[in-house]
Image (cartoon, rainbow, N blue to C red):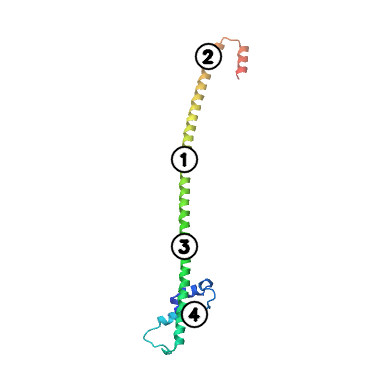
Amino acid sequence: MPLESRTPGIRRVVGRPGGIAEGEPRDLAEDLDNVMRLIQAPKSQPPSTPLPASDPSHLNAALEMIKRAAQAMDAMEDHAQVVQAKAQELAERARYDVRSARQQVAALEQRLSESEAQSEELEARLAESEERARAAHEWLERFQETINAAFATRHQGMPNDIKAQLRSVAG
C-alpha cells in the first residue's frame, strides 16, 4: 500500500504554502515520505543497498531527514492548534448566537402573549360596548313608542291642519 494512501494528510499539510517555514526547501514532504517508508519497511527484508555503519554521510542524511520530519510535524501541530483555536472561537460564537436567538424568541413570545391578552381584553370591551349600544337602542325605541302613544291620544281631538304641521316638524 503506498504511503500516500495511508497518510493523506502529510502531503496536504507539508505541501501547502503555510505548512513549511520560510526558507525551507520544498522537498520536505518527500523527505518525510522517505522517513515513513523506512519506518514502515518490512523488517524481514534486508535493505536493498546495505549501508556501512561507519559511513557518517548516511547517518547525517538520516539525521537531516529526521530533522525535516520533526519540522513537518511541528508545522502540522501548529496548524492543528490554529484550526483548534478557530474551531473554539466559532463554537463560542455559535453559543453566543444561540443564546441571543433564544433571548429574542423569549422576548417575542412575551410580546405575543401580551398582545393576545390585550386583544382578548379589547374584544371583551367591544362586546360589552355593543351590548350597551343594543340596550340603549331598545330603550330609545321604547321611549319613542311611549312618546308617540302619548301624543297620539292627545292629537285625536286636534284639527287635521295642526296634525299635518306636527308631522312635518317631527318627520
Of labels 4 and 2, the one closer to you: 4
Secondary structure beneath disc 1?
helix
Q: What's the amino acid at mark 2?
A: Ala
Up the image or down, 86 lies above or below 154; here it is: below
**Earlier sequence position, callout 4 versus callout 2:** 4
Q: Name the residue nearer the viewer: 162 or 143.
A: 143
Amino acid type, mark 3: Ala
**Residue pictured at 63% horizontal, 14% vertical:** 165
Disc 4: which residue? 30
Q: Which residue is mark 2?
A: 150
Q: Looking at the image, do the residues carrying marks 1 and 3 touch, with CB atoms under 8 Å apart?
A: no
Name the amino acid type tagged 1.
Glu
Query: How far apart in space, not on screen, are marks 4 and 2 (Cα)?
Result: 120 Å
Residue 64 disc label? none
Residue occupying the point 46% across, 43% down: 110
Question: With respect to residue 88, does 150 lie above or below?
Answer: above
The percent position of residue 100, horizontal first and vertical second, equals 47, 51
Q: CA distance from mark 4 to mark 3?
A: 30 Å
Q: Give residue 70's quadrant in the image.
A: bottom left
Looking at the rendered structure, the secondary structure element under dot 3 is helix
Q: CA distance from mark 1 to mark 3?
A: 40 Å
* Image mark for residue 87: 3
Q: Position of residue 148 (x, y in %)?
A: 54, 17
Q: Please report contact status of discs 4 and 2: CB closer than 8 Å, yes or no.
A: no
Residue 114: numbered disc: 1
